[in-house]
Image (cartoon, rainbow, N blue to C red):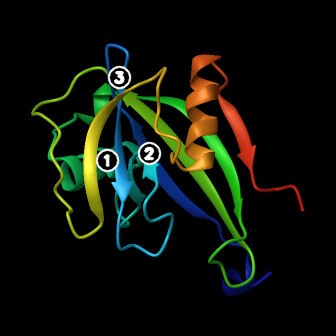
């Protein structure tokens, strides 16, 4: 099969940053995708970088914190099928990392895409957490490494 006709999937990285019993969430704003809902520091690959390098870069760009790629550990993988806001089929492969060490205090580095960055108690999350992110947080609580989202048709 010619390379241009091969199936393609969009990979993304997510940061599960916790401090005690709190988790860092950001509220999306002005992005056209889940605006007004809470998610995690996340992003797509820019090319010519490893998965861990992409996550470290996104942490710096979105939250102003420095994380060494060596300090990132994969804690969950999600295979997602998007229906909303997607012309046709859009499949995602999401890799969730945790870091126990980082430099700096998280601050909102992208106020044009995020209108709040804050720590929330894991037992009292906002109602408007992006549903697939809520699923991941529940999976982490049960040490489930892999889940799927949106495949029911």
For the residue pair 59 and 5, the one nearer the viewer reads as 59
Provide the secondary structure element on which disc 3 rests: strand
What residue does disc 2 label?
14
**Quarter the N terminus occupies:** bottom right
Q: In the image, residue 126 lies at what x, y percent? A: 46, 38
For the residue pair 87 and 124, the one nearer the viewer reads as 124
Measured along the vertical axis of the image, is residue 125 above or below residue 91? above
Q: Which mark is residue 53?
A: 1
Q: Residues within 10 Å of mark 2 (few under 14, many from 20)?
A: many
Q: Quadrant of residue 102?
A: top left
Residue at horizontal 73%, vertical 77%?
6
What residue does disc 3 label?
22
Measured along the vertical axis of the image, is residue 55 above or below residue 122? below
Q: Which mark is residue 95?
A: none
Specify which label sits upstream in the sequence, 1 or 3: 3
What distance separates the C-alpha of mark 2 from that of mark 3?
Answer: 16 Å
Image position of 37 (left or right of 99): right
Q: Residues within 10 Å of mark 1 (few under 14, many from 20)?
A: some
Contact (Cβ within 8 Å) of mark 2 with mark 1: no
Provide the secondary structure element on which disc 1 rests: helix
Q: In the image, residue 90 lies at what x, y percent? A: 68, 71
What distance separates the C-alpha of mark 2 from that of mark 1?
Answer: 12 Å
Provide the secondary structure element on which disc 2 rests: strand
């Amino acid at each position: 099969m010619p390379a241009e006709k091969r199936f393609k999937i969009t990979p993304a990285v997510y940061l599960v940053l916790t401090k005690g019993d709190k988790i860092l969430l950001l509220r999306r704003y002005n992005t056209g995708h889940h605006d007004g809902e809470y998610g995690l520091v996340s992003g797509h690959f820019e090319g010519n970088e490893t998965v861990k390098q992409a996550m470290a870069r996104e942490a710096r760009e979105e939250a102003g914190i420095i994380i060494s790629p060596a300090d990132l550990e994969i804690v969950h993988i999600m295979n997602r099928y998007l229906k909303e806001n997607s012309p046709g089929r859009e499949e995602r492969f999401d890799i969730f990392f945790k870091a126990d060490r980082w430099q700096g205090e998280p601050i909102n580095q992208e106020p044009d895409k995020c209108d709040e960055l804050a720590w929330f108690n894991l037992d009292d999350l906002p109602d408007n957490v992006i549903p697939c992110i809520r699923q991941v947080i529940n999976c982490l609580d049960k040490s489930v490494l892999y889940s799927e989202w949106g495949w029911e048709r």
